[in-house]
Image: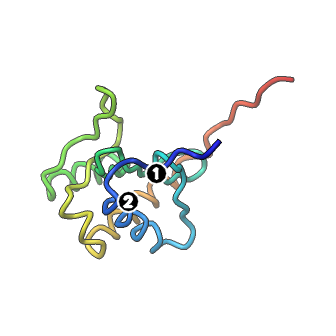
């Protein structure tokens, strides 16, 4: 059976992959739902509408949202705790977005590894 593919805007996916590609130690994951994670904690994702969300500390999120007049990420009617949406025009300006991606990555690195649940045999 073939893997599911991202069905959102191709241009948004290309921009997201270009941004992630600027960081040697970050891998894009998720075929149908592109995201990045560190130690089991997701810190960015691209939704089906082509909107990028970044996860920040409370202070960084407030600063980002104030500068770019962005809001929280809402998925399936629920607000994603800690995430801010990236305006479409900022996603197109990779040089301007890169430091915010780096801040998100650094902050998520301060969280301890997320415990995994192993299936019992």
Quadrant in the picture for the C terminus: top right
Point 21% across, 64% down: residue: 90
Point 31% across, 54% down: residue: 9
Which residue in the rendered view is the most extreme toward the right?
121
Q: Nearer the viewer, residue 97 or 12?
A: 12
Which numbered disc flags the more N-terminal residue, 1 or 2? 2
Q: Position of residue 25 (x, y in %)?
A: 57, 68
Q: Secondary structure at mark 2?
A: helix
Left/right of residue 21 with respect to residue 51 in the rendered view: right
Q: Which residue is mark 1?
A: 34
For label 1, the SS is loop
Above or below residue 55? Residue 100 is below
Determine contact: label 1, label 2, CB under 8 Å: yes
Residue 94 vs 72, above or below: the answer is below
Q: Position of residue 6 (x, y in %)?
A: 44, 49
Q: CA distance from mark 1 to mark 2?
A: 8 Å
**Quadrant in the picture for the N terminus:** top right
Residue 100 found in image quarter? bottom left
Q: Is residue 92 above or below residue 75?
A: below
Q: Residue 51: give its label.
A: none
Residue 15's place in the image compared with 111, above or below, is below
Mark 2: give few (<14), some (14-19) or many (20+) Cα within 10 Å: many
Q: Residue drawn 46% across and 61% down?
A: 106
Residue 92: where, in percent of width, then height?
24, 68
Across and down, in percent, residue 111 comes to: 53, 47
- Pointer 2: what residue? 13
Check the image and name the residue furthest to the front.
1
Viewer-closest of 117 and 32: 32
């Amino acid at each position: 059976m073939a893997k599911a593919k991202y069905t959102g805007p191709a241009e948004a996916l290309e921009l997201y992959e270009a941004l992630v590609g600027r960081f040697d130690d970050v891998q894009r994951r998720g075929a149908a739902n592109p995201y990045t994670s560190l130690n089991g904690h997701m810190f960015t994702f691209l939704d089906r509408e082509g909107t990028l969300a970044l996860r920040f500390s409370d202070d960084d999120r407030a600063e980002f949202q104030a500068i770019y007049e962005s809001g929280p990420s809402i998925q399936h009617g629920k607000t994603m705790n800690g995430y801010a949406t990236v305006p479409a025009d900022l996603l197109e300006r990779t040089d301007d977005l890169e430091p915010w991606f780096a801040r998100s990555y650094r902050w998520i690195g301060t969280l301890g590894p997320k415990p995994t649940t192993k299936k019992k045999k």
